[in-house]
């Protein structure tokens, strides 16, 4: 018996077309903050008691006729296992500006893009930022995983 093929819906086809029409115009660091308690960091590291926590928040800020703006906020911390004290905290926010081809469903598609594909673009910038800034803090540079599910 032949298998039934899952045909893409009209909406998926339109979204694919929207994705092909996106152009990243600008991406930049909007702000950052770091704090380090070096003594506590080394103590957690020596005892292998440190827990690394990473979170990401992606938001669609604005949609206009031919462009949209997004924000990506990241937070990485090294804490004790109980989560009562933080030895290292790194927070940063990136903003990006995209142009797109005309689309009737632009707001819906821009939101979908922000919630799914945007992370593929901005996550490498966050990884590099954490690695670079920790390397300048007189601690071993921290390598953030290639992806996050947050």
Image (tube, helix red, strand yellow):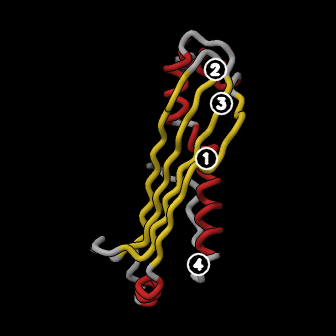
C-alpha separation, residue under disc 2 versus residue under disc 4: 42 Å
x and y percent of residue 24 in the render?
A: 70, 34
Mark 3, Cα crowd under 10 Å, few <14 / some 14-19 / many 20+, is some
In the image, taking residue 93 as reference, residue 39 lies left or right, namely left
Residue 103, compared with residue 49, is above or below; it is above
Q: In the rendering, at what x and y percent does residue 106 appear?
A: 56, 17
Q: Which residue is mark 4?
A: 137
Residue 122 marker? 1
Q: Local crowd at mark 1 within 10 Å, few (<14), some, or many (≥20)?
A: many
Report how far apart the C-alphas of labels 4 and 1 lie in the structure.
23 Å
- Asked if the residues shown at circle 3 and circle 4 are in contact, with their CB atoms under 8 angstroms apart, the answer is no
Which one is closest to the eye, mark 2 or mark 1?
1
Calculate the distance from the C-alpha at mark 2 to the C-alpha at mark 1: 19 Å
Image point (59%, 56%), residue name: 126
Tag on residue 65?
none
Badge 4 density bin: few <14, some 14–19, many ≥20, Cα 10 Å: few
Mark 1 vs mark 3, CA separation in Å: 13 Å
Task: Say which residue label 3 marks.
Answer: 98
Q: Please provide percent x and percent y for residue 1.
A: 52, 17
Q: Residue 138, can we see it?
A: yes
Mark 2 or 4: in front is 4
Query: Is residue 1 at all visible to an observer of this figure?
Result: no
48 over 7 or under it: above or below: below
* Closer to viewer: mark 4 or mark 1: 4
Q: Position of residue 139 (x, y in %)?
A: 57, 81
Residue sitting at x 46%, y 58%: 75
**To which residue does mark 2 refer?**
18
Asked if the residues shown at circle 4 and circle 1 are in contact, with their CB atoms under 8 angstroms apart, the answer is: no
């Amino acid at each position: 018996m032949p298998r039934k093929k899952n045909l893409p819906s009209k909406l998926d086809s339109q979204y694919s077309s929207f994705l092909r029409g996106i152009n990243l115009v600008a991406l930049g660091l909007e702000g950052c903050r770091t704090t380090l308690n070096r003594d506590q960091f080394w103590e957690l590291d020596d005892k292998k008691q440190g827990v690394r926590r990473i979170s990401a928040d992606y938001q669609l800020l604005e949609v206009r006729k031919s462009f949209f703006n997004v924000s990506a906020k990241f937070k990485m911390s090294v804490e004790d296992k109980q989560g009562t004290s933080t030895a290292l905290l790194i927070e940063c926010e990136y903003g990006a500006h995209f142009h797109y081809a005309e689309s009737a469903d632009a707001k819906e598609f821009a939101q979908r893009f922000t919630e799914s594909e945007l992370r593929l673009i901005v996550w490498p910038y966050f990884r590099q930022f954490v690695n670079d800034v920790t390397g300048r803090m007189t601690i071993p540079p921290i390598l953030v995983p290639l992806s996050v599910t947050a």
